[in-house]
Image (cartoon, rainbow, N blue to C red):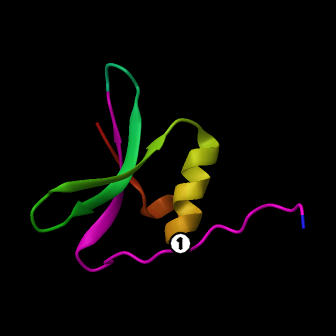
Amino acid sequence: MFGRRKIKTEDYDKENKKPVIRASICTGEQAAGFKDVHTGKFEEVMLIKNHKDMEVFRQRYGISEEEIVKEY
């Protein structure tokens, strides 16, 4: 009853998009999202403020740590 809320898993187009963390060199702000492999267009999904936010992003889309690319 008072347990943790289960995070709903969502799908993304694994053939045409790859998970990316876009980080600012100046401010250190990080945004999680998906980059189209053909056009290079970045689609932001959520802001990453701490390690917990990163875990939520990974669990929501079923992404392993090795799959995520960090871009500056």
Q: Is residue 72 magenta?
A: no
Q: Main secondary structure of the magenta part?
A: loop
Q: Is residue 11 magenta?
A: yes
Q: Which residues are magenta?
A: 2-24
Residue 15, image x, y percentages: 27, 80
The answer, for residue 7, to whether it is visible in the render is yes
* Residue wearing tag 1: 62
Q: Quadrant of the C terminus?
A: top left
Residue under the point 59% across and 72% down = 8
Q: Quadrant of residue 33?
A: bottom left
Residue under the point 74% across and 63% down = 5
Amino acid type at image mark 1? Gly
Which of the pair 5/20 is nearer the observer?
Answer: 5
Residue under the point 59% across and 56% down = 56
Mark 1 Cα-neighbour bin, 10 Å: few <14, some 14–19, many ≥20: few
Above or below 51: residue 7: below
**Label 1's element?**
loop
